[in-house]
Image (cartoon, rainbow, N blue to C red):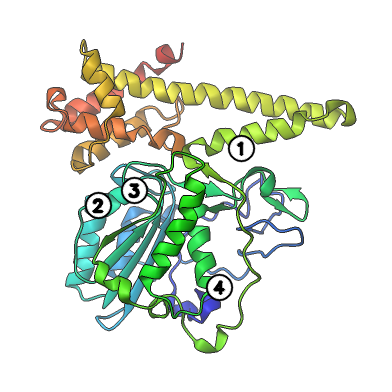
Amino acid sequence: MFSKGFEKTNIITMAYDDIATSDENPFPGKIFNEPDDGQGQDVYAGCELDYTGDAVTPENFAGVLLGNATGRVLESTSDDNVFVFYVDHGAPGFIEFPNDEVMHAQQFQQVLTEMKKKKLFKNLLIYIEACESGSLMEGFSLSNVYAVTAVGPTVPSLGTYCGYEASINGTQINSCLGDLFAVMWMQYVEEEDGSRTLQEFFETVRDNVASYASLHYGNEINMQYGDKSLTNMKLSDFFYGNAKVLAQNRPAWKTPKDAFSAPRLAMDRVTHMYSDASAQPTYKGKSHWRKMKAMSAKMKTLVAAQEATQAIYWSLIEEALPDDENLQELAWVQKMPAKRPSCEVAVHNTLVQSCKGKADMVSSYALQFHQVVVNLCKIPLTGWRHDTSQGVLAAKKVCGDVDHIIV
């Protein structure tokens, strides 16, 4: 946004800020969001973050939008167009923040409604890059609020610039450098002049993402929600500031070679690192043998952790629906809408806290199984829809039995 002429005073940024300083970052102090055969463009340089670390919370996110957080906040009026972009983990019915707290769809929608009441925007454009991100906006309608999500309410999003493609000047990053939806819409904004409509913008980005989604399940495509009359507006109404700097474009984006389903990224990453370390062993020295052993151990640990995560959710189903295998299967495969925030969030938070140190419940791999919680909160036979404490007790029990589950 800054490169397109917006003043930094018009931009508020929240980021946990742990990438540049990570021990696994081969370029300490730098961050890259696309591969490059040369030195690459460090997108961390000059980046001004307003909320970092433990300050990146649902409460502060809502406070920024409503103008009542303790730090910088939105100071817009009914004459301003506002753009909100969220990127992080998601699950059916919520988005997740770095401290493992979540914001449910109904809570997010309440914030948008309150923004409207407080006259904090003329038109509000929202882009959400997260798994199951469509569940944040599904069924929501408010005049002058238009949202685009990376995927619909029941499918994971896609990462890109991963594996061997994630390289800067020949050095492997060993992580994905971008999310496909985000890469595609930022590329479009960089290459256009602002004269296109939001509908043209949506259709082009959606079609580009769909061409990669077809390599997976074919349904990881962008969705649009809310007041679609805003799609007649121009990109320049949201993405372009001072026309004098529009010519100062960055180099053309690299076309992604592939896309990777978010829940699989952790395993794909470790598999890539093991494959790289174990290739042509007779041509490499002892350091590569040590690296191969380390990657092998990491892979075994990750496999065990992912097996434990699935085991916990299966045990939760069996605890909630004993002696009914047909209903248990239904609870595993159905895609029921997330409409019971008190139950869904309480059970999820209990799993996170009670299973901490025993199993991973917050990664994109684990969050895909949150659909199980959504389903159990809705199925009448569990009793959770009327008595959330039953779901909380079940979550505590299966986490207490986690060692037994793993065996």
Q: CA distance from mark 4 to mark 2?
A: 30 Å
Query: Element at badge 3?
Result: loop
Q: CA distance from mark 2 to mark 1?
A: 32 Å
Instruction: Give the residue displayed 83% in from the left and 29% down from the top.
Output: 280
Query: Element at badge 1?
Result: helix
Closer to the N terminus: mark 2 or mark 1? 2
Mark whose residue sits in front, 3 or 1? 3
- The residue indicated by pointer 1 is 269
Closer to the N terminus: mark 4 or mark 3? 3
Q: Badge 3, how many Cα within 10 Å: few under 14, some, many 20+?
A: many
- The residue indicated by pointer 3 is 152
Quarter holding residue 204: bottom left
Closer to the N terminus: mark 2 or mark 3? 2
Instruction: Give the residue displayed 71% in from the left and 49% down from the top.
Output: 26
- The residue indicated by pointer 2 is 138
In the rendered view, tell whether residue 375 sits above or below residue 15.
above
Query: Element at badge 4?
Result: helix
Q: Badge 1, how many Cα within 10 Å: few under 14, some, many 20+?
A: some
Q: CA distance from mark 2 to mark 3?
A: 8 Å
Instruction: Give the residue displayed 29% in from the left and 51% down from the top.
Output: 136
Contact? badges 1 and 4 (CB < 8 Å): no
Going by the numbered disc 4, the residue's amino acid type is Glu
Contact? badges 3 and 1 (CB < 8 Å): no
The disc at residue 317 is: none
- The residue indicated by pointer 4 is 191
